[in-house]
Image: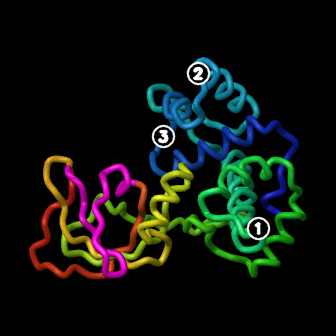
Amino acid sequence: MNALVREPRSQSIEDYLKVTYQIQEQSQWVTTSALAERLGHAPSSITNMVQKLQKLGYLDYTPYYGFRLTDKGKRLALGMLRHHRLLELFLVKVLGYTWDRVHEEAERLEHVVSGEFVERIDRLLGHPRLDPHGDPIPTEEGRLQETTHPRLLECFAGESVMVRRVSDASGEFLRYAAELGLVPDARIEVVECAPFEGPIRIRVQGKDHYIGRDAARRIFVERKNAKSSKPKRPLP
């Protein structure tokens, strides 16, 4: 039986589970304030839904810490991520969408397409491992290759890095990143890290660019080598 078959549930529940999983990837505990910020809902609405998800067996709550997905909740969240990321890749590879437009389309489609439709997309695309932004795609069995990459913000001047993932939370940012060549598999040289919250100077395909701290926070990279024996500290 497909481990990611979805149970009947509302779109709201699906969104909560998926976003909870994404927050949990970065933090051991999830809080109502973190969910409220990501989903744009009032804290009272978040609290009511969290209580509902507890009763349904999707969440475990620990007083003074927060809550986490149960195995049941994690399985369903991974199912939604599989739908979302395969749809994004399908939109880019087959329908010709640019990578900055697919997130919103996939958000709408992921709730209505069937499991069979998604598995046909998977076969059509050759069982891909990554979506257009570099995020890993959960397998049909519910496994996810979770690789932790540092943010560009954490790198030192003199380092050579390769872009592995770019945050897809903002279409405007994705367009900006694409203009600079900051796409998965792009090689970057970190030239200079300005102090006092200043920008980072990077070199992409022989061209120098200055990017701000927020932009550098949204780009995840793999370190290749350090050109400087005494690299400067990254931005604090």
Q: Nearer the viewer, residue 118 or 88?
A: 88
Residue 207 falls in image quadrant = bottom left
Relative to residue 214, is residue 30 drawn left or right?
right
Q: Is residue 83 magenta?
A: no
Q: Residue at 68% across / 61% down in the picture?
A: 85
Q: Which residues are magenta?
A: 198-217
Q: Rounded to the nearest whole Å, what is the CA distance between mark 1 and mark 3?
A: 26 Å
Q: Nearer the viewer, residue 48 or 214?
A: 214
Q: Nearer the viewer, residue 134 or 69?
A: 134
Name the element at disc 2: loop
Q: Which mark is residue 140?
A: 1
Q: Is residue 216 magenta?
A: yes
Q: Rounded to the nearest whole Å, what is the CA distance between mark 2 and mark 1?
A: 34 Å
Residue identified by numbered label 2: 42
Tell me which amino acid carries mark 1.
Answer: Glu
Q: Residue at 74% across / 56% down in the picture?
A: 79
**Hey, which residue is sitting farthest top in the picture?**
44
Residue identified by numbered label 3: 29
Q: Nearer the viewer, residue 209 or 6?
A: 209
- Which mark's residue is nearer the viewer, 2 or 3? 2
- Which mark's residue is nearer the viewer, 2 or 1? 2
Q: Residue 235 at what x, y percent from top left? A: 21, 54
Sequence order check, earlier mark of 2 and 1: 2
